[in-house]
Amino acid sequence: MNEADIGIIGGSGLYDMPGFSNRTEVELKTPFGKPSDAYMTGMLEGKRVAFLSRHGRGHRVMPSEINYRANIHGFKQLGVKQILSASAVGSLKLEHKPMDFVLPDQFVDRTRHRVSTFFGNGVVAHISFADPICARLAEEVAGAAKTMEFPIKRGGTYVCMEGPAFSTRAESNLYRSWGMDLIGMTNLQEAKLAREAEICYVTIAMVTDYDCWHDQHDAVSVEMLISYLTRNSENVQRLIKQVLKRLPTEVDCPCQHALKNAIITDPACIPPEARERLKLVIGKYVSCE
């Protein structure tokens, strides 16, 4: 199946992507279970695109319940080579204000109950994850924002927390003392799995609040988030469409060779069921026939 070249993951507040032509709803099964929702495929700004709502339409799936492996594997099944991921975040620095957009380039994992790899059960691989965001793709997003005169900040560290509750003040201040920039609940797993799947990945982080550390701002509330999410979703749709206009569909990026030399298991020792489960991920390097 090769229905799309570019994937878009919509986070809180972004459950659809208007403007598709030849729009088709695609239900997929993966070796890792069901994705969060059906993929919307079609043409957008002249590119073959697949859109997925991370939390499902209607926001039905908690961050810890998201089947990250199925979501990323589904994009791989559709032929996607690059993913633009939009995500609502809290700010841990005064300079990142509500309604700002940031392109973080690092992550710190504070989750506890999630699977972040396709591997295990007979196959071991260790990808390089020193630079978890595709720098080329981040440059394309920043370039598109510049042409729009759309304010966006490059760099920073995203703390991925478990949730679903927001931070305590002590936690928020701890992360600030570490020099962290943003806090969210979803993007670390996506980035890891996209790298294992050899898909370029970038986070477009949309700031909605100052978490709970800022004395002069109210602690995070759902009402506050929804207000900012609605406005941010309109802005990120405009930005993504501008990115699509300039994004090449044929790229040769180091992200797309991430598993070269990363698979440690002797191919002769890989169980048949593991070969079948991972054939789309490892088939370039290991015979799965």
Image (cartoon, rainbow, N blue to C red):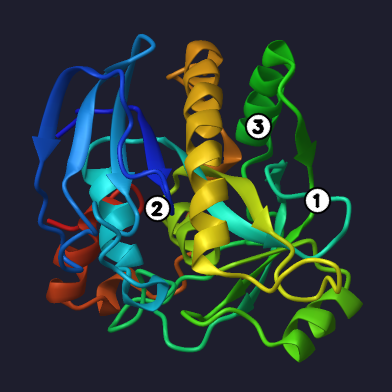
Amino acid type at circle 2 is: Ala
Q: Where does label 2 land, which residue?
A: 197
Estimate the spatial distance between the alpha carbons at disc 1 and disc 2, rounded to whole Å. 31 Å
**Badge 2: residue crowd in 10 Å (few <14, some 14–19, many ≥20):** many
Q: Where does label 3 land, which residue?
A: 136
Q: Position of residue 41 (x, y in %)?
A: 21, 29
What residue lies at 41% left-to-right and 77% top-to-bottom? Answer: 124
For the residue pair 122 and 78, the one nearer the viewer reads as 78
- Quadrant assignment for the N terminus: top left
Q: Sequence order check: which comes first, mark 1 or mark 3?
A: 1
Could one spot residue 252 in this view of the protein? no
Q: Where does label 1 land, which residue?
A: 96
What residue lies at 28% left-to-right and 79% top-to-bottom? Answer: 269
Above or below 74: residue 40: above
Is disc 1 placed on a helix, strand or loop?
loop
**Marks 1 & 3, CB-CB < 8 Å contact:** no
Camera-near label (3 vs 2) is: 3
Q: Hey, which quadrant is residue 142 in on the image?
A: top right
Above or below 270: residue 208: above
Estimate the spatial distance between the alpha carbons at disc 3 and disc 2, rounded to whole Å. 17 Å
Is disc 3 placed on a helix, strand or loop?
helix
Amino acid type at circle 1 is: His
What residue lies at 78% left-to-right and 49% top-to-bottom? Answer: 97
